[in-house]
Image (cartoon, rainbow, N blue to C red):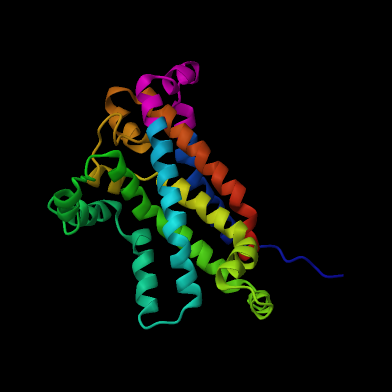
Amino acid sequence: MRRTRRPPLLVVAVAGLTVVFFLIPLVGLVERASWSTLTDDLTSTEAATALRLSLICSIGATVLSVLVGMPLAWTLARVRFPGRSFVRALVLLPLVLPPVVGGVALLSAFSRRGLVGEHLYDWFGIQLTFTTAGAILAETFVALPFFVITVEAALRSMDQRYEAVASTLGAGRLTVFRRVTLPMVAPSVAAGAVLAWARALGEFGATITFAGNIVGRTQTLPLAVYGALDANPEVAIALSLVMLAVSLLVIVSLRDRWLERS
C-alpha cells in the first residue's frame, strides 16, 4: 500500500499566509459595504450611468478584439515569417505595460495632434480623445492580448490533420476554417472573448489617460469608483463589489479550462 507523504508544514503555512494576503482586502471590502443601502447605491444615477457605459465600452472592445484578434492569432499560430517573435512580443506588450503609459502612447498616436489622430481629424473630422469611442479604443488596447494569446494557443495545440483531410476533399481555405478550424477552437475563442471582456470592464489607467473621466461619456465603472471614493464612498464600495463579483464569476467559469491546460 502506497503511503501518502505529509506535505512540509512550513510550505503549507506559507501557502496559507499567501491565501490570507489575497483574502483580507476582499473581506475588508465586503465588511465596509453598506448592505442596507446597497440597492440604492447601485441604482443611483451616477452608478447606473457608469454601469451602462461600462457595458457599452467593454462589449465594444470585446467585439473589436474578436474581429481583429482572430486573424492575428491565426497568423501568429500558422504563418512563419521573419520577425514573428517580435510581433508576438509587441502584441503582448500591453499585458506588462503600465496602463497609464499605454494611455500616453494612445495619446501620441490618436489624439488630435497624434501621429494618426491628426489625419483622422483633418480628413474625416474624427476625434477619439475624450469620447466614448476613445474609451472603447483604450479598452481594446489592453484587452486584445488576452484574446490573441488564448486563441493562438488553441490553434497551435489543435490537430491540423483534420484541416488537411478537409483540404484533400476539395474544401477551400475559408470553408476549412469555417467548418473545421473554428468549431475545434470555439471554446477557446469564447474563453478569450470572456477574458478580454473582463479585462476591458476593469480597465482604468489607459482609459482615464486617453479618454478622460467625463460622466456619461467616458466615465466607466473603475473611473466612477475612483471619483466616488472621497465624495461618496458607499457608492464606490458598492460598485467595487459589482466588479469583484463579475471578476470572480469569470475566473470560476474559466477555472476548468485553465486547469485542463495546466
Q: Is residue 112 left or right of residue 58?
A: left
- Residue in front for this viewpoint, 250 or 119: 119
Q: Nearer the viewer, residue 31 or 146?
A: 146
Q: Position of residue 169 (x, y in %)?
A: 69, 77
Q: Residue at (37%, 83%) from the top-left corner?
A: 82
Q: Position of residue 151 (x, y in %)?
A: 52, 63
Over which residues does the magenta segment extend? 28-51
Q: Is residue 82 left or right of residue 18?
A: left
* Residue 8 lies within the magenta run: no
Quadrant assignment for the N terminus: bottom right
- Magenta segment's dominant SS is helix
Relative image position of residue 173 (x, y in whole percent): 56, 72
Relative to 174, say whether 112 is above or below. above
- For the residue pair 32 and 36, the one nearer the viewer reads as 36
Question: Looking at the image, is 248 positioned above or below residue 160?
Answer: above
Q: Residue 188 location, x and y as percent?
A: 58, 59
Q: Residue visible at 61% across and 53% down? A: 255
> Which residue extends farthest right?
1
Count how many numbered circles sit on residues in the image.
0
Residue in the image at 42% along x and 34% along y: 240
**The C terminus - image quarter:** bottom right
| Residue 49 found in image quarter | top left
Residue 59 visible, this angle: yes
* 74 displayed left or right of 170: left
**Quarter assignment of residue 158:** bottom right
Residue placed at 61% from the left, 70% from the top? Answer: 176
The answer to whether residue 258 is visible is no
